[in-house]
Image: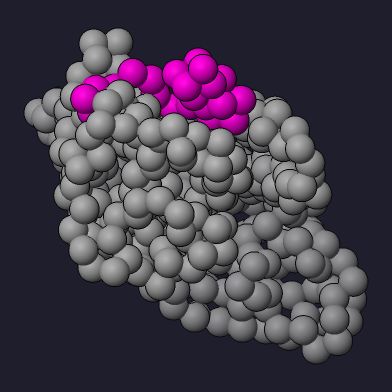
Amino acid sequence: MNRKLGILLAAASIFAGCGDKTSEISGILENPLPRQYIFLQELKPNELLNVDSAIVSEDGSFEFKRKVKFPSFYLLKINQNNFLTMLIEPGEKIKMTSHFDSLNYPVAVIGSKGTKLIADYNRLLIKTRNKISRLNDIYNSNSGRPDVAKVIDSLDNLGDGYLNDMNRFAKKYIDDNLTSLATIPVLYSQLTQEIYILDPQKDLSYFLKVDSSLFKKYPEYGPVIDLHNQIKEMVAYYDGKELAKPNPGERNVAPEIALPSPEGDTIKLSSTRGSFVLLDFWASWCAPCRTENPNLVKAWNLYRNKGFKIYQVSLDKTKEAWIKGINDDGLDKWIHVSDVSYWQSIVVPLYNIESIPANYLLDKEGRIIASNLRGDALQRKLAEIFK
């Protein structure tokens, strides 16, 4: 399933029955740079189409006029990191005010209900992302402390709370605006590059709500048709296939894994039988994983001579990034394997992995005895085993 918004926005040619109407986009930017350009881009299938540009006046004003046949998504853009997502309807006269360096955080938007809805949602999303960024800063400034594991646990709890708050807000936003096309980008919004606000499986009912409401109102609109087809795929996927999910309480034997090491040798998980093994899923792009890695190094140093092994599986996209992550974090002491296939890795459905870091602790027979042990919890469990 492709979650990219661009695919959902493909379909200009499918919209029918709408005549050209001129929409106007104007605004005031506070403290602009001299002769600063501002750009208007239309979201097309898997691309951004530059449709117009203007020089911001000395007083901060700018204006665009665009013939619009159907509701369309646009970006009002200063640069790659400074833009406002807009949902423009035919004939709208949109006025906005913003600080020059924060278009995505406008002071005011009038004349476009869809654009205002998106701006209101993004405002809270940006605040939440900034909170997550501050958590990373706190970790970086405390990574050398002897009690860093406690710091990690505390930061993880705060991060989970921020995600849960954003998840609740997204659901209320959808319930309050079910007939608006502005709900489409909310379905696919992300807190980080790896973490989606809404989980397609756990929150499937909200995908269904949006699909039902919009398909009834816009049965011939391309973005809605694409969304409708994708939701059908989601339902078929989650209803028609029960993923294997190890249950630690039943002491199941962990499913076999046989993947290449960085050197190209295939190493089986079963080759570690006879030792207590931490089966750990991670990736170099995963900040929480990198935060937890020092705890794994600590565990390895304490118990490696007592029959403890680590079998670490990466969901990296490239071999280069994977190996760099291993070297940068000092993880070259234990077993590493990966098919470098990101979320398409064969281990994802095999272990029902929904997020990382994730881990399973295996006994000497390869049976699962605990899962998702981090920080002090991992240290306590290993101390109990090797006492």
Q: Is residue 237 above or below residue 18?
A: above
Q: Does 108 lie within the magenta span?
A: no
Q: In this view, which residue lies farthest toward the front? A: 305
Q: Nearer the viewer, residue 109 or 311?
A: 311
Q: In this view, which residue lies farthest toward the top? A: 249
Residue 200: percent from the left, percent from the top?
A: 33, 34
Q: Is residue 358 visible?
A: no
In this picture, residue 9 sits left or right of residue 63: left
Q: Is residue 334 above or below residue 369?
A: below
> Magenta segment, which residues?
365-387
Residue 140: percent from the left, percent from the top?
A: 74, 51
* Residue displayed at 85% across by 76% down: 32
Q: Is residue 194 above or below residue 168?
A: below
* Residue displayed at 57% across by 74% down: 40
Residue 316 picture quarter: bottom left
Q: Does 377 lie within the magenta span?
A: yes
* Residue displayed at 56% across by 57% down: 329
Q: In this view, which residue lies farthest toward the bottom? A: 35
* Residue displayed at 70% across by 29% down: 150
Residue 26 picture quarter: bottom right
Q: Nearer the viewer, residue 97 or 100?
A: 100
